[in-house]
Image (cartoon, rainbow, N blue to C red):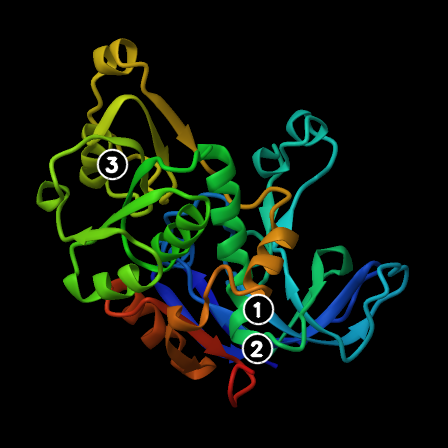
Amino acid sequence: MKAAVIEKPGEISVRDVPAPRPDPGHVVIQVGACGICGTDLHIAAGEFPPSPYPLIPGHEFAGTVTEVGDDVHTGIAPGDRVAVDPSLFCGHCRQCRRGRGNLCANWGAIGDTVDGAFAEYVAVPATTCYRLPDTLSFAQGALVEPVSCAVHGVRRLGVAAGERILVIGAGTMGLIMTQLLAASGARVSVVDLMESKLPLAESLGAAEVATSVDDLPKRAFDAAVDVTGAPPAIEDAFNSLDRGGRLQIFGVAADDASVNLSPFRIYNDEITVVGSMAVLHSYGDALELVADGIVQTEPLVSHTFALDEFEQALSMMRSGATIKAQVVPNGGEAA
């Protein structure tokens, strides 16, 4: 089969590799659509320490089950259309035993630490598969994973109806967070340097938008969410908070990045700083939110690429010229 392979940081090829076979407890999926995430950009650049090389990336995906291995007891069968939670938790470390598998000492994820779905086929544990309703396309199914990350983030943040919340970044994750926060009754303000992204944020629930925090009406926020991972944006988010506010670091920063936050203000104003890492018991709920139309995913996919165009798709994501780019490894529409 054909797959996109990150041979080592900075070196990518699209080449033939052996087709996967299902181990016991696993299934093989013909990939219908796979989204490019900021994490994929970090993996391609060698900035995501858990990733080994060579690696077939791709952790936001949906497709059709083609083979089922032995000892599969989930009822998943060939022909089923599924979306996949890429999380791989060991189940026996201290954090897993405490119910915090996303902090697993042996954390892994399909497409991040083992071969993923920028390929014609991918093998996954059957327990990670969720049947797609007939009403959802593969393109929508591939967006369930980022929605599930945002669901976990909203739970970590804690949101009360009527709160004023700032979201910095109007890419895929910022637009998903905006929808979830607005649906929770918050009044959401969205900031992004690219003015062209802001009308979509308004259409998806933002009460106000701007290209700079300074351009918003002068007021303090109850909470701020940074989805960019950029230290200056994190500092702007922190400085926008009212006393007693909460800052969420949602975007993925470089592992050696640092920010300048006032420890006195954290103490004196009782500022809470909270992180949000990936997916935790949120995938099934995310699928329901997408299926019920509470989170709109169709407006988020701005570009679709063939597998041979993988490097072009990465470049477009790096440029910021797209909201969500998806790859269709087997051709055709991501239906």
Which picture quadrant has residue 20?
bottom right
For residue 130, side relative to residue 162 (left or right): right
- Residue 239 sits above or below residue 226 on the image: above
Residue 163 appearing in the image? yes
Query: Three-letter amino acid code at disc 2?
Result: Ser
Indicate the position of residue 175 as horizontal and vertical percent values: 36, 57
Name the residue rendered at 46%, 65% in the picture: 296
Mark toward the start of the polypeptide (1 vs 3): 1
Indicate the position of residue 301 as horizontal and vertical percent values: 40, 72
Query: Three-letter amino acid code at disc 3?
Result: Ile
For residue 329, side relative to residue 288 (left or right): left
The local secondary structure at tag 1 comes to helix
Which picture quadrant has residue 303?
bottom left
- Residue with the mark numbered 2: 137
Mark toward the start of the polypeptide (2 vs 3): 2
The local secondary structure at tag 3 comes to helix
Quarter of the picture holding the N terminus: bottom right
**Disc number lying in front (2 or 3):** 2
Instruction: Give the crowd class for mark 2: few <14, some 14-19, many >=20 residues within 10 Å.
Output: some
Indicate the position of residue 56 as horizontal and vertical percent values: 53, 65
Query: Three-letter amino acid code at disc 1?
Result: Gly
